[in-house]
Image (tube, helix red, strand yellow):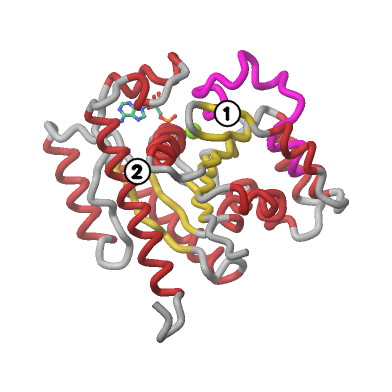
Amino acid sequence: MEDKCKVIAIANQKGGVGKTTTAVNLGVALANTGKRVLCIDCDPQSSLSRSCQISDDPDSLDVTLSELMEYEMTGEDKDYLLINNAIKQFESIDLIPSNISLSGTETALFNCMSRESVLKRTIEPLRKNYDIILIDCMPSLGMMTINALVAADSVIIPCEPSFLSVKGLDLLLHSIAKIKRQINPTLQIDGVLMTMVDSRTINAREITSALRDAVGHNINVFNIEIPRSVRATECPNMGESIFVHDPGGRVAMAYEELAKEVISLERKAQTKLRPHGIR
Ligand code: ADP
Ligand code: MG
C-alpha cells in the first residue's frame, strides 16, 4: 500500500515560541478537514500531554513515548499492544504522551545502535494509520530533537517576532541542513511560522518583514501569521483546543488557514513525486 503519511516535526530550540500550541491546534485543524492526525509529545516537560489534559499527572502514566522508544532500542519485534496502549485521544486527534522519563530515554540513546533513528523506527508501524503525524519537539537541539528531525518528512518552525528569536533561527537552520546532508536527505522545511504576532506593534511588523527579506528567498515563511490572543493563552488551562475554547476567533481562523497552507504544500510535493506521463 502506498504510504501517504506525512510526518512533520514542529521544532525550535527556543522555548515559549508556540511549538506546543501549534502542535495541538494545527493537529485539530487538520483533523477537522478529515485528516487522520496523531500528535507525539517529544518533550520531557510534557507540555502537550498537559495541555490536552491526558492525565492529571503525566509522570504517573505507565506507557508513554519513552517506553515505546526503549522497547525499540532492545531490538525486539514490535509490540503492537504496547503501541496501542500508548495512544490516547484528544478532541479529534490521537496523541502519544510523554513524561519526565523521556530525559532518561534521551541519555540512553547515546549508547544505542543507530541512535539518531530510534524515533523513526518507533513510529514506522503507525504511518499506515494516519495522514499526518505531528511531533512536538523539546526546546533544545539535543539527541531527541535530532531523532524527531530524522523521523520527519518536513519541519515547521514556529518563531516569535522578536529580535532574539529571529537571530536564533540561524542555528536551527544550520542543524537542519546538517541532518539533511548526513542522515535525512529528503527532509523539507515546510516553513517558518510567525506566532504570537501583535500586528499593532511596529516592532512585530518590522521584524516579520525583515525575516521575510532575510530568509524568504529560499525558505518558505507561511503567509498566515498566528495572532497573539489571551484566548490562546487560556487553552492549556482549560484542556481545550482553540477550536473548542474560542471557535471562530482570530487564532482558530489562523490555524485553520495554516492547515490549508500545509495541505497545499503536501499536494505540491505529491505532484512533484509523480513520474512524467502519469497524471
Ligand atoms: P513552546 O512549545 O514553543 O514552548 P507554547 O506553545 O507552550 O510554546 O507557548 C508558550 C506560551 O505562550 C504558552 O503559555 C501559550 O499558551 C502561549 N501562547 C502560544 N500561542 C499564543 C498566541 N497565539 N497568543 C497568546 N499566547 C500564546
Ligand atoms: Mg512546548
In this view, the residue farthest toward the bottom is: 277
Q: Residue at x 20, y 59 (%)?
A: 213
Q: Which residue is mark 1?
A: 89
- Residue interval drawn in magenta: 48-69
Could you tell me the amino acid type at mark 1?
A: Gln
Q: Which residue is mark 2?
A: 159
- Residue 275 point in image, percent of width and height: 46, 82
Q: Quadrant of the C terminus?
A: bottom left
- Residue 251 point in image, percent of width and height: 27, 31
- Callout 1 secondary element: strand
* Discs 1, 2 touching: Cβ within 8 Å: no
- Callout 2 secondary element: strand
Quadrant in the rendering for residue 249: top left
Q: Relative to residue 159, is residue 114 drawn left or right? A: right
Does the numbered disc 2 mark a residue whose Cβ is under 8 Å from ligand 1?
A: no
Vertical arrangement, residue 180 with respect to residue 18, above or below? below
Q: Relative to residue 62, is residue 206 drawn left or right? A: left
- Residue 71 point in image, percent of width and height: 82, 43
Q: Relative to residue 59, is residue 89 drawn left or right? A: left
Q: Is residue 58 magenta?
A: yes
Q: Is residue 270 magenta?
A: no
Which of labels 1 and 2 is toward the front?
A: 1
Vertical arrangement, residue 57 with respect to residue 13, above or below? above
Q: Residue at x 41, y 67 (%)?
A: 269
- Residue 167 point in image, percent of width and height: 34, 49
The CA span between labels 1 and 2 is 28 Å
Q: Residue at x 78, y 43 (%)?
A: 80
Quadrant in the rendering for residue 164: top left
Q: Quadrant of the N terminus?
A: bottom right
Query: Dot 2, crowdedness within 10 Å: few (<14), some or many (≥20)?
Result: many
Does the numbered disc 1 mark a residue whose Cβ is under 8 Å from ligand 2?
A: no
Q: Residue at x 56, y 63 (%)?
A: 179
